[in-house]
Structures are given as C-alpha cells and as structure tokens.
Image (cartoon, grey):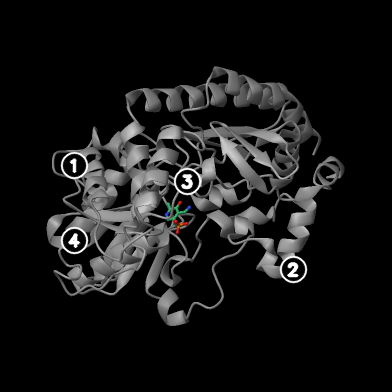
Amino acid sequence: AGAGAAAGAGANAEFAARAARLIPGGVNSPVRAFGSVGGTPRFFVSGSGATVTDADGREYVDLVGAWGPALLGHAHPAVVEAVQQAAARGLGFGASVPGEYELAEEIIARMPEVDLVRLVSTGTEATMTAIRVARGATGRPLIIKFAGHYHGHSDGLLAAAGSGLATFGLPGSAGVTAETAGQTLVLPYNNLAALEHAFETHPGEIAAVITESAAANMGILPPDPGFTEGLIRLAHAHGALVITDEVLTGFRASASGYWGIEREGMPDGLQPDLFTFGKVVGGGLPLAALGGRRDLMEQLAPLGPVYQGGTLSGNPLAVAAGLATLRNADDAVYERLAAAADALAVELDDALTAAGVAHRVQRAGTLLSVLFGDYPVAPATYDDVLGQDTAKHRAFFHSMLEAGVNLPPSAFEAWFVSAAHDDRVIGRIAGALPAAARAAAAA
Ligand code: PMP
C-alpha cells in the first residue's frame, strides 16, 4: 500500500479528494472506487490503443478496456472520426437517423437469431426491457436469474448479482422492495436440477430465465458443457423464454458473442428467444440493445403493448461509434484478441505457478480472468468463487499498477484485451507478472 499511496500522491490523489467531496465515494460507478484493493484510484486523461494515461502523466498498459467497449483499442482513429463527423452533423434530433437501422443490420448480420433490434442507452435498460417483453408476452410474473450473474442495476436483478456487489460483499441492494425481490428466483449457476425444481415448484409462473451467455461478472465462469442446451430445453418445455445477456460477451468473446461459440454445438432450432447487447455495440458511447424473435420484439411499442422509450435512444454519436467499431471488427481483430488472450493466459499461469501462488486462469473465448485460490476442478457456481483470496489479488493488483499495468480493481471482474494488444504490449505485461506473482505469494 505504501508504494500505491506514494504514486497516487500527485494529481490523482488531489482529484480523488475533490471528487469525494462532490460525488458519493468520488465515483459514478462503484467498482471504480478501488473499494476492495485500497489506494488511490487513477484519473485517466487520455487513452490510445492499448494504453491509458493518468492525471500524473503516467502511462499504463490497459486491461480494463473501458469495461469492454474498447475492442479496437482506445481512441481508434476510425471510431473517433465517425463520432466527430456525426457530432458535426448534430448531436441528436429526437427523431430517427439512418445509422440506427445500419447498426441493427450489423447486429443481425452477426446474430442470425435476431429478427428485430431495439436500441437503448445502457445494458441495464436492455435487460430491464427484455424482461418486460418476456412478462408482457407470457403474462407470467416470475424471473429466474443465476447467482453471480450481473445484468445491470434494475431493481429486480440486483440479488446475488456479482460485479460491484461481489467486490463490496453485498448480497443485494437496499431500496428494493420485498415484493420486487420476490419476483426474481435466484438459482445456482450450472445446475439443471435446481432449474427443473424451480419450474416444477412454480408451474405457469415463470416468464423467463435470464443468463449471461458466459458468466463474466464473478470472474469468468463459462457454462458447463450441456448447461446452455439444458437450460433452453427446460425453459421452453415449461413455456418460459430465455434471455441471453451478451452485454459483456457480445461481439467480444467471438465475432458473435459467447452464444456464437456455443451455437455450433446446438441441435437445429434450439436457441434463446431474446438477447441483450452493450459495451462493444456502442463503441464506447452510451448505447446498448436488445433483439430477438420477431413476435416477441413486436410486443414493443409502438407495435405492441409493452412500453419502452428513451430521449437518447439511438443517439447519432453513439450509433456512429458502434457502427465504426463493428465495421472495423473483422476476422483479423478477433484473431488478434484471441492470440493476445491466449498469450496472456500462458504468461499469467507461468508467473503464478513459478511463485507458488494457488490460482486458476479462467477463459471464455477472448475473455480471461484469474481466480486466486485452490481450484483443483473448474468452479461452476458463485459460491465456488466467493471464497477466493482477495488479499493475494490486492497485492498482485498493486504490483501490476506500480509496474504500469492497469488491471480491473476487483478479483471478480474480467480482463479485457483489444486489437491493439500486440506482442510488444503482451511483452510489457509479461515483464510485470513475475514481481506481481511474488507479491501475491507474500500476501
Ligand atoms: N449485463 C452484463 C452481462 C454486464 O456485464 C453489464 C455491465 N457490466 C450489464 C448488463 C449492465 O450494463 P450497463 O452498465 O451498461 O448498464
């Protein structure tokens, strides 16, 4: 902590103190507060490619990637230019712009299961709306979610929600009524027996199962083989819908998300009903989406009785950023992401093994994360990962930060590489790993 405090003693510390007087906890989203790692959060003033620069002028290799959107790297010239051109044409009109259907086309081209797309501004809105559509279409009240899955901060989805709640050790959120919380059944992930039992206990009452296509907000926990297929079969057998949340994984885990990886192995016609997207689809600006089967999406106003709307929905700058990102995310980009994630996983594993730190590197497509703890078999549930050694993560995190590598400030978050993470960048990260692994060993 000494080194961390010293390095943060300049502009970062001053800005953090000023922000803390004006903004709750000094942050506008809790995980930014360094709550579980301690020390001074960095204020970033610029980013380019694989690096970000803090308020003290210090450059870091970045593995946060704006929590996902920065697929092409920070300030990619094509994205910046598209946004600048859109801005010059006007910041928004509260009416449709051509980029909205162009972005819908891009999404549908990568996701053949999606017939219609509705653009919103945040992942929270996307999942909230998908659930409203599911309830509207089925006329049923209850939702199933899995412990450790994060679907944004709408009231009904905050129980056992991973992400910031895991970081801060919260079971759920105050301010959610018992009635609302009672309409969400929280089940263990990767457990089809528990799912079947829930359907049998609540016949005709469950509108939808919402699931991250691969859990990525409690560290990375991909679905066990057969879990996704079993989940879809069970839900459909009981007249419930499946909402696959690809906000984090979409257009990142692979060109068509984590479902895109699982799709290949599925029997014909077996697929989720609704999908949610965010992060990459907005290219770094506030944009997210939901999409899926035509008859379900047609439930939305103005065609149907399920209401949803937004002053900023389909904002032309956000649409331009998303379009430029997806149009530039070609096969070479995904190959680079995969190569970077593979190389990093090996370096990480080697460094922690050499230092004698019990760990497990987790993967889902191009996403990775590391669990600090003894995991002889792959963890499958939230309970499996909640007990990890956060003191080791903390020591590891600060050693990396001091060496100029910006990792997620939580043991429960995914690491994000970008197309700008070339071999040289991976080499810089690799150079910092042995000392960080030794710091973890000593913690
Ligand atoms: N779903 C998933 C899987 C997410 O990872 C997130 C955000 N990390 C959300 C939904 C919520 O998105 P937003 O923060 O844009 O509201």
Secondary structure at badge 1 equals loop
Tell me if 8 is positioned left or right of 349 in this view.
right
Label whose residue precedes the other's in the sequence (3 or 4)? 3
* Residue 39 appearing in the image: no
Label whose residue precedes the other's in the sequence (4 or 1)? 1
Of 143 and 92, which appears nearest the observer? 92
Query: Are dots 1 and 3 in contact, CB under 8 Å?
Result: no
**Residue position marked by numbered label 4 in the rendering:** 297
Binning the other alpha carbons within 10 Å of mark 4 as few (below 14), some (14 to 19) or many (20 upward) gives many
Which residue: 66% across, 38% down? 53
Q: CA distance from mark 3 to mark 2?
A: 32 Å
Residue 348, percent from left and from top: 62, 26
Label whose residue precedes the other's in the sequence (2 or 4)? 2
Tell me if 35 is positioned left or right of 140 in this view.
right
Query: Are dots 1 and 2 in contact, CB under 8 Å?
Result: no
Q: Say which amino acid is labelled 4.
A: Met
Q: Which mark is residue 112?
A: 1
Quadrant assignment, res 237: bottom left
Q: CA distance from mark 1 to mark 3?
A: 23 Å
Residue 143, percent from left and from top: 33, 67
Q: Which mark is residue 216?
A: 3
Label whose residue precedes the other's in the sequence (1 or 3)? 1
Binning the other alpha carbons within 10 Å of mark 1 as few (below 14), some (14 to 19) or many (20 upward) gives few
| The quarter of the picture showing ligand 1 | bottom left
Label whose residue precedes the other's in the sequence (3 or 2)? 2
Q: Say which amino acid is labelled 1.
A: Pro
Tell me if 27 is positioned left or right of 320 in this view.
right
Secondary structure at badge 3 equals loop
Q: CA distance from mark 1 to mark 2?
A: 49 Å
Q: Eyeballing the image, is 429 above or below 221?
A: above
Q: Which mark is residue 21?
A: 2
